[in-house]
Amino acid sequence: MLIFAHLNFGMRTKSLKKNKINVVTLGCSKNVYDSEVLMGQLKASGKEVVHEEEGNIVVINTCGFINNAKEESINTILEFMQKKEDGEVDKVFVTGCLSERYKPDLQKEIPNVDAYFGTTELPSLLKALGADYKHELIGERLTTTPKNYAYLKIAEGCDRPCSFCAIPLMRGKHKSTPIEELVIEAEKLAAKGVKELILIAQDLTYYGLDLYKKRNLAELLETLVKVDGIEWIRLHYAFPTGFPMDVLDVMNKESKICNYLDIPLQHISDSILKSMRRGTTKEKTTQLIKQFRTAVQDMTIRTTLIVGYPGETEEDYQELKKWVQEMRFERLGCFTYSHEENTHAYNLEDDVPEEVKQERANEIMEIQAQISWELNQEKIGKIYKVVIDRKEGNYFVGRTEFDSPDVDNEVLIDATKTYLKTGEFTTVKITEAADFDLYAQVII
């Protein structure tokens, strides 16, 4: 159910500003990618387009995944509607997952938005903005990430039946992008100076099943490593059931593929996994993680968990907590369950109180902070290749191959002692370590 704060919008004077389109992105990396494609198409039609800057025409790319994200999306729409009312912007268009999922509700509750578009309506959105959809624009994106890395979306949608997830409602069935198109896109990104590709999809492991009748992620990786200029390839969002183990062989063989895998596991109690419709068990999941660590030495595994799922007992939670302590994941995030309508789990009673959900999530993250601190202490004195993402205060901020932007550890290098260029790689020695940050000095 969407909750709106009602605003009254009256008449206002149209501004005299030249048309500049401001694209505002909310939500996940898939949305970042979609916004970049939209901006590339607009630029190809000769439109002036910016990302989250001033513009008199606004396109809000919304997220509709969980309650917090929906709230942020609605608040952003209302904020820009107020700006429209005040004459600061002329038109507001809404696209993305929230719009796909709740278009009739949104049209009724916030009718002054100029138009709403779903996740598959890019040509219609472009038309409303006075632009043409150009099919030939493979990989022509305006990237919004720092110049050294970019997301590469290898598939859209999802065929998994997870009970808690509304993504298939918003993104449709799984659809892989052909290898040759992804290579063209990677080559264009490399030509712009991108050195790190972060492969994203709702489920990377499903890649190729629809096009090639087999799980084809390994072949895609073997092709992408041949792209000149790309130094790191990182894997995000794998599913634990049916994982194509040949990917690990490629990871071992090809130095460009980071020894890193983001694999959301969600829970470990067998009864919760069954209710979540994850298609796996505690035993199988534990075995899979052990296989990963045996097959690829010093592999970093990032996972995410959900606490407070309907029917999660104290015993279920304690089992999860103990498992987190035993598995010692290098990277871990924990979220509280969000009761989403039209999902399978919505038929269950959302029976874990909000404060209990929060307490459980906080406790898991405290355990993880300690694990992360201990693992980081082991890195002191070791030497790593690091990419520099940005300068912040008196530090250059970089990452090792074991860290993804925005969510993982960062390496801080004293900028008063060393000059480094953002986007470049350097070799460092770790001198100090905290829970989630490493301090280092450059090795000349």
Image (cartoon, helix red, strand yellow):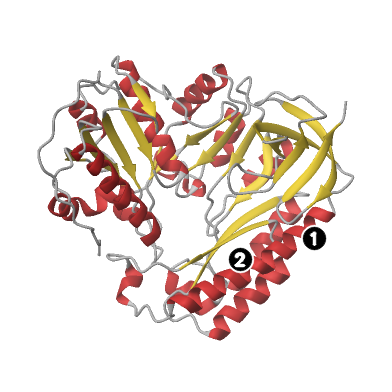
**Tag 2 or tag 1, which sits nearer the N-term?**
2
Horizontal side, residue 413 vs residue 302: left or right: right
Q: Position of residue 411 (x, y in %)?
A: 73, 41
Q: Is residue 426 something that shows in the picture? A: yes
Q: Residue 284: percent from the left, percent from the top? A: 61, 68
Q: Please give the label number shown on residue 285.
A: 2
The tally of labels here is: 2
Q: Amino acid at mark 1?
A: Glu
* Amino acid type of the residue tagged 2 in the rendering: Thr
Rendered view: 431 above or below 323: above
- Label 1 crowd (10 A; few <14 / some 14-19 / many >=20): some
Q: Residue at x 36, y 37 (%)?
A: 24
Q: Residue 220 location, x and y as percent?
A: 55, 34
Is 235 displayed left or right of 167 in the figure? right
Q: Nearer the viewer, residue 348 or 369?
A: 369
Q: Residue furthest top?
A: 46
Which residue appears at 66% of the width and 68% of the height? Answer: 366
Residue 133, above or below 320: above
- Label 1 sits on residue: 374
Residue 118: quarter of image: top left
Dot 1 and dot 2 residues touching (CB under 8 Å): no
Dot 1 falls on a residue whose secondary structure is helix
Q: Nearer the viewer, residue 213 or 138?
A: 138
Asked whether 291 or 338 is in front, the reply is: 338
